[in-house]
Amino acid sequence: MGEKYYVVREKAVPEVLLKVLEAKRIMDSRELTVQQATEEVGISRSSFYKYQDDIFPFHDNAKGKTITFILQMDDEPGLLSDVLRTIAAYHGNILTIHQSIPINGVATLTISVDIAPEVGDASAMVEHIEARSGVHDFKILGRE
């Protein structure tokens, strides 16, 4: 079964995770190293690396949301088409897509999808893709 995603209020998020978010924001805005940013917010580099891919800010906006994810999938006829049909079924609009040449029967797919406001369901789309046989190592790289 794939990973589950939750939306929680800031007050329910452990302080270390909020500090990871702050360190990421600092690194983006001031071009600091991980060491400099983690020292500034008061967490260890190991905490930053442990959680950096598990927390991201939620931005609810009227234009919908863009999700960029990466997954590994078997080099199987029709699998990419199934993933693309799933995105369309959840009212997703593909912005970018890149598939690597399969190595040992596994290809890497990086895709950015704009989810239509009010009609799209990003969480259900992600769950559906993750549950597909032949899809491995699904990871969300970012959300806007």
Image (cartoon, helix red, strand yellow):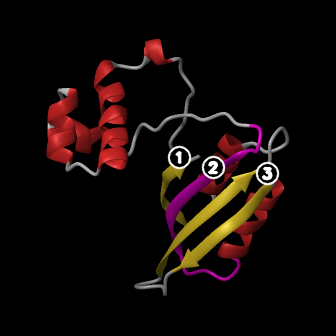
Q: Is residue 54 visible?
A: yes
- Residue to which mark 3 is pinned: 90
Element assignment for label 1? loop
Amino acid type, callout 2? Val
What percent of the width, then of the height, locates residue 54?
Answer: 40, 40
Residue 86 vertical placement versus 50 (above, below): below
Q: Judge depth for marks 1 and 2 and give the one in front.
A: 2
Give the residues in magenta. Answer: 62-78
Q: Residue at x 80, y 48 (%)?
A: 116
Please give the name of the residue rendered at 71% of the width and 65% of the height, measured from the top-left corner: 94
Using residue 48 as the reference point, say whether residue 113 is left or right of it. Answer: right
Q: Nearer the viewer, mark 1 or mark 3?
A: 3
Please give the name of the residue rendered at 42% of the width and 37% of the height, measured from the top-left corner.
55
Residue 6 versus residue 137 in the image, above or below: above
Residue 59 in magenta? Answer: no
Q: Helix or strand or loop: what does disc 3 sit on?
A: loop
Percent of width and height locating residue 25: 37, 40
* Magenta-drawn stretch contains 70: yes
Q: Position of residue 139 (x, y in %)?
A: 47, 54
Q: Report which residue position mark 1 lands on.
A: 2
Tell me which label, 2 or 3, sits earlier in the chain: 3
Q: Quadrant of residue 92?
A: bottom right
Q: Residue at x 50, y 62 (%)?
A: 70
Which residue occupies the foreground of this view, 88 or 33? 33
Whether label 1 touches label 2, CB < 8 Å:
yes
Q: Which mark is residue 126?
A: 2
Residue placed farthest to the front in the image? 30
Residue type, numbered disc 3:
Tyr
